[in-house]
Image (cartoon, rainbow, N blue to C red):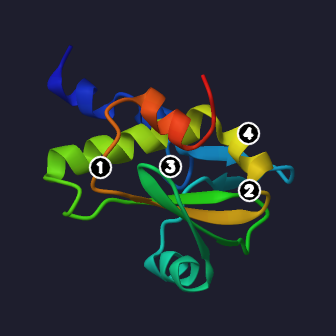
């Protein structure tokens, strides 16, 4: 496979905004709504207005959403570990959100949720799922 094809693979699957389909969900109106909070102003608003729910491996900050869907953000500071560990933790939580978005959306109806990863980080996806009470 040519090197250029490796970089272009999956590009045809992106929407007009350049978002991958795994990070978007179709809403009732047919427009695409992102599943994640992207702007720092949105994240700062949730951190300021939201209530905190401490869990074993993370802290959830939950605030009322200005959109009609639940949206998420994941924060892993340097206290968690090096870049490899922080990115692994974010991947684990993103995968849990992707797999159980429907359950999370029903549980947190029209809420923006920030997941702040703690220092004692989960080792597997099953740890993340049990921490968020999602089961397997």
Front tag of 1 and 3: 1
The residue to which callout 2 is attached is 108
Q: Earlier in the sequence, mark 4 or mark 1?
A: 4
Image marks 1 and 2: residues in contact by CB distance under 8 Å: no
Q: Quadrant of residue 91?
A: top left
> Which residue has dot 1 on it?
120
Of circles 2 and 3, the one toward us is 2
Look at the numbered disc 2 and give the secondary structure of its residue: loop
Circle 1 or circle 2, nearest the eye: 1
Q: Is residue 121 visible?
A: yes
Q: Earlier in the sequence, mark 2 or mark 4?
A: 4
Residue pictured at 28% horizontal, 41% vertical: 88
Q: CA distance from mark 4 to mark 1?
A: 27 Å
Q: How much space separates mark 2 and mark 3, taking CA atoms?
A: 24 Å
Mark 1 or 3 closer to N-term? 3
> In x, y percent, where is residue 110?
77, 63
- Identify residue for label 3: 19
Q: CA distance from mark 1 to mark 3?
A: 32 Å
The residue under label 4 is 102
Q: What is the x, y in percent for residue 4?
A: 21, 30
């Amino acid at each position: 496979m040519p090197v250029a094809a490796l970089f272009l693979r999956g590009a045809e699957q992106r929407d007009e905004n350049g978002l991958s389909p795994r990070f978007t969900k179709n809403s009732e109106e047919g427009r695409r709504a992102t599943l994640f909070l992207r702007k720092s102003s949105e994240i700062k608003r949730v951190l300021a207005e939201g209530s905190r729910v401490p869990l074993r491996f993370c802290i959830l900050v939950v605030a009322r959403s200005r959109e009609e869907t639940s949206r998420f953000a994941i924060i892993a500071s340097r206290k968690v570990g090096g870049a490899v560990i922080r990115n692994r933790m974010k991947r684990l939580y993103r995968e849990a959100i992707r797999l159980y978005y429907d359950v999370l959306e029903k549980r947190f109806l029209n809420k923006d949720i920030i997941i702040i990863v703690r220092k004692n980080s989960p080792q597997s996806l099953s740890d993340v799922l049990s921490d968020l009470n999602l089961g397997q």
